[in-house]
Amino acid sequence: MAEPESLCEQLRGHFGPRLIACETAYGEVTIEVSPEALMTVMRELRDAPAYRFEQLLDIAGVDYATYGQDEWVTEQASSTGFSRGVTEPGVGRIGGTGVYGLQPITENTGRRFAAVYHLLSFEHNRRLRVRCFATDDDFPLLPSVIDLWSAANWPEREAFDLYGIVFDGHPDLRRILTDYGFVGHPFRKDFPMVGDVEPHYDEEKGRVVYAPVEIEPRVLTPRIIRRDHRYIGSPSAPREG
């Protein structure tokens, strides 16, 4: 049995029903746990001799509101690219106008916001990804793991700032990337993609000031699916069916 599958079987046997899922993909193992089980599972992953995930590499916030959807899938290339002013309705857009705007998400699925923890074991030379979904989309709340890994301090603040995920027990949960007084969480998929004002530092006033936003039109090239002799047999070649 390959190493990822072996680790997955070991984790299932050890944690049992505390694991919601355990998957392997691209040589990596991902487990999912509930917020209620997160701290006990993480503590055992850190301390148990069979695992010894001593280092927390990163915590990534994720908004799964439109997971798996893609506006730019096409099988034909364009000579000019595509304007960002698309007319199809979707999260973060006003449909039919080509104007970016807010289209709120009203369904509370309990599977929208998640924190993804990346762990490393020096002793066993293993990596592990742990995913934990907040059960309330309107107020995503997860326990802080800062008592287990002090390195969680800034990544949890970043996930709070950009996604609005609140980490219960964090000693200093403040914004870390956005400006003072910023309203909202910019990486949420229902956040307006274009604002009304933009900040800049005024040398004469000696402080940050706000001015009406100026946005230049942008043209992007979408992801192109190519089927020709250059890609036959290539690992990146699209699969049929």
Image (cartoon, rainbow, N blue to C red):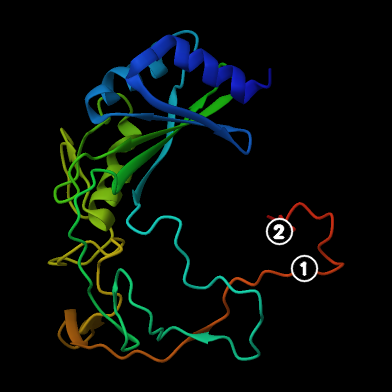
Kind of residue at disc 2: Pro
In the rendered image, is residue 14 in sight? yes
The secondary element bearing badge 1 is classed as loop
Which quadrant, please, contains the C terminus?
Answer: bottom right
The residue that appears at 17% across and 45% down in the rendered structure is 173
Residue occupied by mark 1? 227
Q: Is residue 194 left or right of residue 107?
A: right
- Residue 213 location in percent, x, y? 26, 88
Q: Does the residue at mark 2 contact the one at mark 1 (Cβ under 8 Å)?
A: yes
Question: Who is closer to the viewer here, 169 or 140?
Answer: 140
First-in-chain label (2 vs 1): 1
Please give the label number shown on residue 238: 2
Look at the picture and state if 97 lies above or below 236. below
Question: Who is closer to the viewer here, 104 or 186?
Answer: 104
Look at the picture and state if 193 lies above or below 190. below
Label 1 Cα neighbours within 10 Å, binned few <14 / some 14-19 / many ≥20: few
Question: Who is closer to the viewer here, 38 or 190?
Answer: 190
